[in-house]
Image (cartoon, helix red, strand yellow):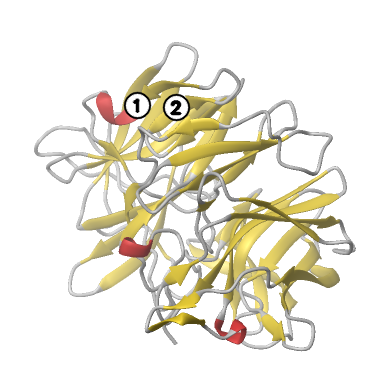
């Protein structure tokens, strides 16, 4: 079954069967680099996933102790085989463990002895794709928003489950449906006077946040057949953990809720507890909206226009927006460092002369000790990890990744 992404119509891509790859080796960063072995998993601080392609695509994880060391890493004769073990589209990482859907379960995996080992799992028996992680959110529990959905014709609603899991022992604490009313339908491109059947609508969640006893899910209504979606801003709000008393916030001023249906992040909570999310139009005119920390409605006094900036970054077969909070109102959006408190763009990481920011998954952009780590690709296809320091606005190049790299998928802090 092939499905289309919902984040940018002209760049929509298939996701099933995608292989996420990673690999590393270390050496000096010159035109003819030597290669040394990667750090042992017992002492490693970071894990990096890399897609590589030789005769076919491969998936590896390599581990390093220092992202900023002037060295070269490569998948050649090194790395931990991740093929079939970790799903990059849906998998997530937390506190030394990878979580990924496998069959009818969500598997908890750890790197031991140079390989991925399942330490526990949580069985989900809700049918095809329901255990696939469209979005996750961590609080005291591991919260998973399912990719699968059910349309209820009699109620004209679409339901997606939220699984609340104790990550320590992978006990399923609860599974409750998020109920999305069908507020708008999509006109049939082949017959503009008619609408496509509601049963063919798909809820494409763009963000998933839990705060102050409430769930917030940004979303759009999507049709896979025509790769089209509604053009309004939607945010579902309900009680947590019951998922009851659902309401849908709407706004038709700034286009549709931006983001993708899978594990990227298109919203964030700042250090004041305010929730920020983005909307966009088909010609990429972005606006940042806000829900204040003690409220459950869109703040009508706040609308930060980024219409002059393209927040999409390329990679992994398409273009994506991915927003990562750093500190003090600063966030990475695309290649830009944006100050949401003062409503200004502080820096463009693509303007430093080191290359361009590449797209990544939910763990692909790392914030550690209030510094930002991103993947940068040069015009001659060299791949680097770079660190942005918001205090002095510097961007510093770290290790380089070589060896047939097609995408650096994510950076995870293992310890």
Residue 32: x %, y % from top left: 9, 39
Residue bearing mark 1:
348
Q: Is residue 122 left or right of residue 196?
A: right
Query: Which residue is situated farthest in the left direction here?
Result: 32
Q: Is residue 284 left or right of residue 378?
A: right
Residue bearing mark 2:
337
The answer to the question of whether label 1 and label 2 lie on touching residues, with beta carbons closer than 8 A, is: yes
Q: What residue is drawn where x is 23% and y is 34%?
A: 355
Closer to the camera in the image, 20 or 251? 251
Q: Is residue 42 left or right of residue 321?
A: right
Q: What residue is drawn where x is 75% and y is 33%?
A: 292
Residue 64: x %, y % from top left: 43, 42
Query: Which quadrant would the N terminus be assigned to in this image?
Result: bottom left
Vertical side of 141 occupied by 302: above or below: above
Circle 1 packing at 10 Å, graded few (<14), some (14-19), many (20+), is some
* Among the 4 quarters of the image, the one containing residue 300: top right
On the question of residue 333 being in view, the answer is yes
* Among the 4 quarters of the image, the one containing residue 383: top left
> Which of pointers 1 and 2 lies earlier in the amino acid sequence?
2
Say which element carries label 2: strand
Q: What residue is drawn where x is 42% and y is 73%?
A: 4
């Amino acid at each position: 079954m092939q499905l289309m992404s919902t984040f940018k119509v002209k760049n929509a891509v298939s996701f099933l069967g995608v292989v996420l790859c990673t690999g590393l080796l270390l050496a000096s960063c010159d035109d003819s680099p030597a290669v040394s072995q990667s750090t042992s998993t017992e002492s490693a601080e970071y894990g990096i996933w890399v897609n590589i392609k030789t005769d076919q695509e491969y998936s590896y994880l390599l581990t390093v102790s220092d992202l900023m060391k002037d060295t070269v890493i490569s998948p050649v004769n090194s790395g931990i085989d991740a093929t079939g073990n970790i799903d990059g589209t849906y998998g997530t990482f937390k506190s030394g463990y990878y979580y990924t859907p496998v069959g009818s379960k969500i598997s908890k995996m750890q790197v031991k002895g140079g390989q991925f080992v399942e330490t526990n799992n949580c069985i989900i028996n809700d049918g095809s794709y329901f255990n696939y992680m469209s979005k996750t959110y961590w609080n005291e529990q591991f919260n998973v928003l399912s990719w699968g959905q059910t349309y209820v014709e009699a109620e004209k609603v679409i339901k997606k489950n939220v699984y609340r899991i104790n990550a320590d022992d992978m006990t399923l604490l609860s599974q409750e449906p998020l109920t999305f009313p069908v507020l708008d339908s999509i006109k049939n491109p082949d017959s503009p006077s008619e609408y496509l059947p509601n049963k063919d609508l798909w809820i494409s969640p763009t963000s998933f946040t839990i705060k102050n006893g409430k769930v917030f899910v940004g979303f759009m209504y999507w049709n896979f057949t025509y790769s089209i979606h509604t053009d309004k801003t939607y945010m579902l709000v309900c009680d947590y953990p019951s998922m009851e008393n659902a309401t849908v916030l709407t706004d038709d001023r700034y286009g549709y809720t931006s983001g993708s249906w899978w594990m990227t992040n298109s919203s964030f909570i700042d250090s004041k507890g305010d929730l920020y999310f983005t909307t966009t139009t088909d010609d990429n005119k972005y606006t940042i909206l806000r829900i204040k920390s003690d409220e459950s409605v869109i703040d009508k006094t706040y609308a930060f226009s980024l219409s002059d900036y393209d927040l999409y970054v390329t990679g992994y077969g398409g273009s994506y927006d991915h927003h990562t909070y750093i500190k003090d109102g600063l966030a990475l959006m695309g290649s830009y460092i944006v100050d949401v408190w003062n409503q200004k763009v502080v820096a463009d990481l693509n303007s430093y002369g080191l290359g361009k920011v590449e797209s990544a998954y939910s763990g692909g952009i790392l914030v550690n000790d209030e510094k930002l780590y991103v993947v940068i690709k040069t015009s001659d296809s060299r791949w680097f990890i770079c660190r942005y320091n918001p205090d002095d606005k510097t961007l510093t190049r770290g290790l380089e990744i070589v060896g047939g790299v097609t995408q650096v998928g994510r950076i995870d802090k293992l310890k």
